[in-house]
Image (cartoon, rainbow, N blue to C red):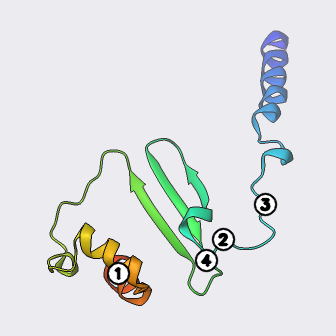
């Protein structure tokens, strides 16, 4: 019985080493305002990007084995085309680009 008690005490003492150390924390001085500055979270199968100032706070989720192939009405227009995207960028039509390519995701 004494041996079992010692083994349990040693096992419990060792689990403290499994907690993340403070130097591995994610600390941001300012909120990430764009998706490419977002805080990445995940486990290899499920991932998330978290960004925004809280009004709104945006979270993009993705899974390695999940793809949504349902048609999206906003993408069924003639404007949804790589050539149109390039032309609008050259012409400085950024509001149109945002409306067509970014707004459907929010």
**Mark 3: secondary structure:** loop
**Label 1 Cα crowd, 10 Å radius (few <14 / some 14-19 / many 20+):** some
Label 4 – label 3 distance at C-alpha: 15 Å
Taking the spot 21% from the left edge, 80% from the top edge, the residue there is: 79
Residue placed most toward the observer, 23 or 98: 98
Q: Are marks 4 and 2 in contact (CB under 8 Å)?
A: yes
Label drawn at residue 88: 1
Please determine whether, in this image, residue 19 is positioned above or below residue 13.
below
Left-right relation of 16 to 88:
right
Considering only order in the chain, which callout, 2 or 3, is on the residue closer to the N terminus?
A: 3
Q: Are marks 4 and 1 in contact (CB under 8 Å)?
A: no
Label 3 – label 2 distance at C-alpha: 11 Å
The residue at which mark 4 appears reads as 52
Q: Nearer the viewer, mark 1 or mark 2?
A: 1
Label 1 – label 3 distance at C-alpha: 37 Å
**Mark 2: secondary structure:** loop
Q: Nearer the viewer, mark 1 or mark 3?
A: 1
**Label 2 Cα crowd, 10 Å radius (few <14 / some 14-19 / many 20+):** some
The residue at which mark 2 appears reads as 32
The residue at which mark 3 appears reads as 27
Considering only order in the chain, which callout, 3 or 1, is on the residue closer to the N terminus?
A: 3
Label 4 – label 2 distance at C-alpha: 6 Å
Please determine whether, in this image, residue 78 is positioned above or below residue 61.
below
Residue placed most toward the observer, 76 or 9: 76
Residue placed most toward the observer, 31 or 22: 31
Whole-percent x and y of residue 75?
A: 20, 75
Label 4 – label 1 distance at C-alpha: 26 Å
Q: Nearer the viewer, mark 4 or mark 1?
A: 1
């Amino acid at each position: 019985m004494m041996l079992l008690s010692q083994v349990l005490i040693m096992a419990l003492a060792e689990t403290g080493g499994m907690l993340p150390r403070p130097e591995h924390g994610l600390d941001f001085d300012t909120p990430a305002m764009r998706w490419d500055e977002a805080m990445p979270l995940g486990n290899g199968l499920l991932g998330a990007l978290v960004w925004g100032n809280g009004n709104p706070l945006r979270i993009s989720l993705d899974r390695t084995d999940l793809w949504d192939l349902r048609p999206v009405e906003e993408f069924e227009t003639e404007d949804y085309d790589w050539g149109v995207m390039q032309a609008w960028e050259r012409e400085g039509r950024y509001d149109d680009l945002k409306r067509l390519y970014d707004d459907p995701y929010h």
